[in-house]
Image: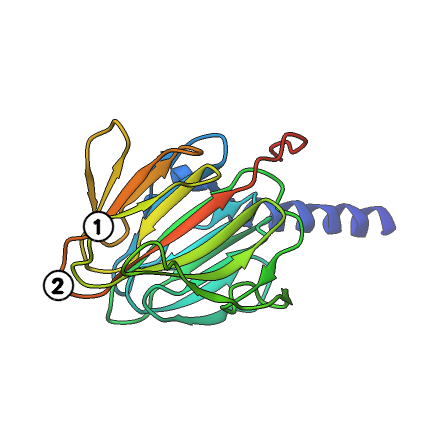
């Protein structure tokens, strides 16, 4: 009888495992669209129409996500209770990854964001001028107006040992501004404005909401707000970490 009971228990365990959903890699999740990949990041545009859900998908590395428009979704992490996530337009969030989840959009609005996988070890996260990572330590918030650059305001949001996230605001129709990224940088437009970015020696690129560009270290870049309203973008600057390896 003990042998029969043991065999039945094993059969039940194997049956439950066989029925458990299997998470797909992010590139195989049809609501995630790869738009950029290099040694530092892998970036996806995410769009989940109203009353639709993603497949169960796996996040293996830390990542940032920024909402394009207001977000109202259910975050169903495998093995945990569901959580209701509400975000404002342009709000930035951070996750250490290493889990699988489903994003379910029960609202009447489409859910859109940019998900930025961080491919180097990040170390401890620290919130600065925004609550980006839940439970992270808090550092000083210093808003600095770049006096040498007319019409440009920089607000430091968040950092890890590997990366700094700045929110940059451009006044309506400012003069052309010049910036020189001291580190490799990713720029993501956050609203419906039009931001013209011209890396030295390259063609101009106009960014609208959710569009992005990679900037090389120490490259001279000109920036201009082409719209008649305040425009903003997220700039991620990556510290050069020769000792770091991709997880």
User: Which disc number belongs to residue 123?
Assistant: none
Q: Residue at x 16, y 59 (%)?
A: 173
Left or right, 208 with respect to 164, comes to left
- Say which residue label 2 marks: 228
Q: Residues within 10 Å of mark 1 (few under 14, many from 20)?
A: many
How many labels were placed on the picture? 2
Q: Identify the disc placed on residue 224.
A: 1
Q: Residue 221 appears at what percent x and percent y?
A: 31, 39
The foreground one among 52 and 145 is: 145
Report the residue at 35% width, 58% height from top.
53
Q: Give the structural element (helix, strand or loop) at label 2.
A: loop
From the viewer's perspective, is residue 66 above or below residue 238? below
Q: Nearer the viewer, residue 145 or 139?
A: 145
**Quadrant position of the C terminus in the picture:** top right
**x and y percent of residue 107 in the render?**
29, 71
Circle 2 packing at 10 Å, graded few (<14), some (14-19), many (20+), is few
Q: Residue furthest top?
A: 201
How far apart in space, not on screen, are marks 1 and 2 (Cα)?
11 Å
Most foreground residue, 92 or 185 = 185
Q: Is residue 29 visible?
A: no
Residue 113 showing in the rendered view: yes
Find residue 67 and report its image quarter. bottom left
Left-right relation of 14 to 54? right
Where is residue 188 shown, x and y percent of the image? 33, 49
Q: Colour scheme in the image?
A: rainbow
Q: At x 66% / y 45%, what residue is drawn?
A: 14
Question: Element at badge 1?
Answer: strand
179 and 61: which is toward the camera: 179
The quarter of the displayed image where residue 234 is located? bottom left
């Amino acid at each position: 009888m003990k042998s029969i009971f043991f065999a039945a228990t094993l059969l039940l365990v194997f049956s439950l495992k066989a029925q458990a959903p299997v998470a797909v890699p992010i590139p195989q999740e049809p609501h995630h669209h790869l738009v950029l990949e290099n040694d530092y990041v892998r970036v996806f545009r995410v769009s989940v129409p109203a009353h639709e859900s993603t497949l169960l998908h796996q996040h293996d590395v830390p990542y940032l996500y920024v909402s394009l428009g207001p977000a109202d979704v259910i975050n169903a992490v495998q093995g945990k209770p569901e959580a209701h996530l509400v975000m404002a337009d342009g709000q930035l969030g951070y996750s250490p990854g290493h889990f699988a989840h489903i994003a379910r959009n029960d609202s009447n609005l489409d859910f859109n964001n940019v998900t930025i996988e961080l491919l180097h070890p990040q170390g401890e996260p620290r919130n600065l001028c925004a609550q980006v990572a839940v439970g992270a330590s808090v550092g000083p918030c210093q808003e600095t107006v770049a006096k040498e650059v007319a019409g440009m305001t920089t607000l430091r949001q968040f950092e890890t040992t590997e990366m700094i996230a700045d929110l940059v605001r451009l006044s309506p129709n400012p003069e052309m501004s010049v910036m020189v990224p001291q580190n490799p940088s990713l720029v993501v437009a956050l609203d419906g404005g039009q931001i013209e970015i011209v890396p030295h020696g390259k063609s101009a690129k106009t960014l609208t909401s959710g569009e992005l560009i990679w900037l090389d270290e120490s490259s001279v870049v000109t920036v201009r707000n082409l719209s008649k309203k305040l425009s903003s973008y997220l700039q991620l600057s990556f510290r050069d970490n020769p000792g770091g390896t991709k997880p």
